[in-house]
């Protein structure tokens, strides 16, 4: 099975978790895109009545283009279920997210949901977090200060650039992303607290204690981890 096939499989399985009448959070990234498309099919074919809040402009546009009712948290402040991917999943449901630069809105939407189900292919499972660079969203003005503080913590920050190299990437909230090439994160809680302490950091990509279930797609199909 290719990674894209695994993402499609787990996205489809996640769409089955959605029930009529639910308020649903839509994640961001290629796996979430598969989920949103599968959910859109259910809305169209089964007449599923749901309302959604998305964690990025891209997922909002995708949902709307599929005829889904996508509103803001102002309209729908409490969600039943949030489905989203991750860049790394370690034991205890410790996640790194933000590879798609949507970590801030993703954390807000995840925190507004009663249940966050993370959907990944098996390549995302790790014993310890940190091989994937840890994204940190930063207020533009504070970039030099935050870069300096993160370097002092040996987190090795690099400003994320646009793919064509024409300038720094801006998030949906018009902030910068610093990707920290820090290697293994031995104590994610401690690292999260140190990062949070830096003035100018808006949010970091360590998602700790937020997910309550992980669906993993691999050669044997989809496995449900509830721990
Ligand atoms: C976006 C994210 C994504 O969920 C994460 O990057 C995984 O993406 P993909 O499903 O494309 O592998 O956190 O900010």
Image: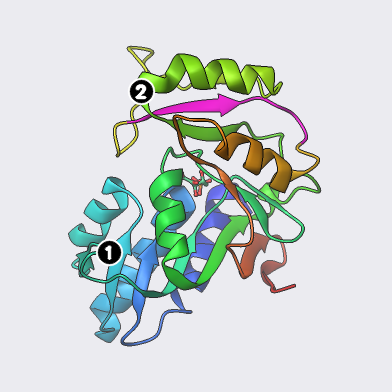
Tell me which corner region of the image, top left, top right, bottom left or bottom right, holds residue 137. Answer: top left
Tell me which corner region of the image, top left, top right, bottom left or bottom right, holds residue 23. Answer: bottom left
Q: Which residue is mark 2?
A: 140
Instruction: Report helix, strand or loop for mark 2.
Output: helix
Identify the colour scheme used: rainbow
Instruction: Answer above or below: position of 160 versus 100.
Output: above
- Residue 53, image x and y in percent? 30, 64
Q: Residues within 10 Å of mark 1 (few under 14, many from 20)?
A: some
Which of the pair 220/76 is nearer the observer? 76
Stretch in magenta: 175-184
- Label ID, residue 73: 1
- The quadrant in which the N terminus is found is bottom right
What's the CA distance linking mark 1 and mark 2?
25 Å
- Residue 39, image x and y in percent? 36, 71
- The quadrant in which the C terminus is found is bottom right
Asked whether 218 falls inside the magenta stretch, the response is no
Which of the pair 136/141 is nearer the observer? 141
Q: Is residue 77 visible?
A: yes
Residue at 46 percent of width and 61 percent of height: 110
- Residue 80, image x and y in percent? 41, 78
């Amino acid at each position: 099975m290719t990674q894209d096939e695994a993402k499609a499989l787990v996205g489809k399985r996640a769409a089955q978790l959605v029930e009529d009448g639910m308020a649903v959070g839509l994640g961001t990234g290629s796996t979430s895109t598969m989920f949103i498309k599968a959910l859109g099919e259910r809305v169209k074919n089964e007449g599923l009545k749901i309302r959604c809040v998305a964690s990025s402009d891209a997922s909002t546009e995708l949902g709307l283009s599929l005829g889904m009712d996508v509103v803001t948290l102002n309209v729908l402040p409490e969600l039943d279920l949030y489905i989203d991917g991750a860049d790394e999943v370690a034991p205890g449901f410790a996640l790194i997210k933000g590879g798609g630069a949507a970590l801030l809105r993703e954390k807000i939407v995840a925190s507004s949901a009663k249940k966050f189900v993370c959907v990944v292919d098996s390549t995302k499972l790790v014993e310890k977090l940190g091989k994937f660079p840890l994204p940190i969203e930063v207020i533009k003005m504070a970039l030099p200060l935050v870069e300096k503080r993160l370097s002092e913590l040996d987190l090795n920050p690099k400003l994320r650039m646009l793919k064509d190299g024409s300038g720094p990437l801006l998030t949906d909230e018009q902030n910068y992303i610093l990707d920290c090439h820090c290697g293994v994160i031995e104590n994610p809680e401690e690292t999260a607290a140190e990062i949070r302490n830096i003035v100018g950091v808006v949010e970091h990509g360590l998602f700790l204690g937020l997910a309550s279930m992980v669906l993993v797609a691999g050669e044997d199909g989809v496995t449900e981890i509830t721990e």
